[in-house]
Amino acid sequence: MSPLLVSEKTLELNICAEILSLIRSLSGCHGAFWIGMKQDQEAKNGLDELISNLPAGMHLALQFKAPRSRSPNHVPYRFTINDRQNDNLLRLATGRPDAAYYVFPHYNTFTRMRSNSPNLLSDTYFLRVDDLRNLSHSTNRLGTHLVETNPPIALVHSEPSTVKLTVASDMLKSLLGKEKSVLQAILVPHTWLKEWLEGLIREAEGNRRAVGQRLRGFSTFCIS
């Protein structure tokens, strides 16, 4: 197996397992659970089921990204974000700027993943989606931006702008260690998440498959 075949889904599954364990260890969060969005051929039934059965609670929204395979195990790690997805996430973050994050794991080889497991969060970084609110749309035909992460900052191209990165485990402990009454004003209510998902479906004119593609790498952690 090539050492450079670490997929976005592999990173999401392994890091979410660590995040869920950490969240459940915090006071008042033992009943938290992870919601992974269904995609592609599963998107139609998956989205309908999720919207009709969305659990009540508060949601921490995470958009996972996988680093490019070039320059293995080397800082800066390079990721790609796109305008359509970023615009969608910004809508979710409106009014709840500390509830939605990009997740940038510094792992693009299985060798390094194996050596750091089960502490992948120690070299995984969060970037607040809301910190990209003033990002100009890309001028390339794909509508994409290059993100170079060199903690504690990241450089977002093509009009270079610097944004702050936070170690994932540090941010989670700081945010989720707060009282429930405080978290209710920080995290995304389930009604907001449901309305956001319904809005994505309307914009895609009911094409659940297209929405599933837009939700690739998107997860939420629900705390009741």
Image: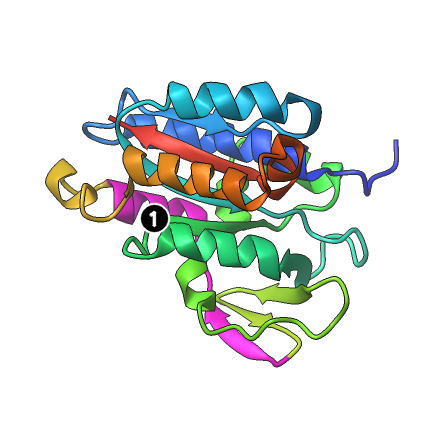
Note whether residue 159 is visible.
Answer: yes
At 54% from the left edge and 78% from the top edge, which residue is drawn?
Answer: 161
Colouring chosen for the image of the structure: rainbow
Q: In x, y percent, where is residue 80?
A: 67, 58
Specify the quadrant that holds the N terminus.
Answer: top right
- Label total for image: 1
Q: In this view, does 73 lie to the left or right of 131?
A: right
Instruction: Name the quarter where the C terminus is drawn.
Output: top left
* 121 to 33, vertically: above or below: below
- Find out whether residue 172 is within the magenta segment: yes
Point out the residue furthest to the bottom here.
Answer: 159
Is 171 placed left or right of 39 in the picture?
left
38 or 114: which is nearer to us? Answer: 38
Quick one: which residue is furthest to the right in this view? 1
Residue at 74% across / 38% down in the picture?
6
Residue 22 on the magenta segment: no
Q: Position of residue 85 (x, y in %)?
A: 57, 53
Label 1 sits on residue = 99
- Graded by Cα atoms within 10 Å as few (under 14), some (14 to 19) or many (20 or more), the crowding at tag 1 reads many
Q: Position of residue 100 (x, y in %)?
A: 40, 49
- Residue range of the region highlighted in magenta in the rendering: 159-176
Task: Name which residue type carries label 1.
Answer: Ala
Residue 107, x across and y down, in percent:
66, 46
Can residue 126 be seen by looking at this rendering?
Answer: no
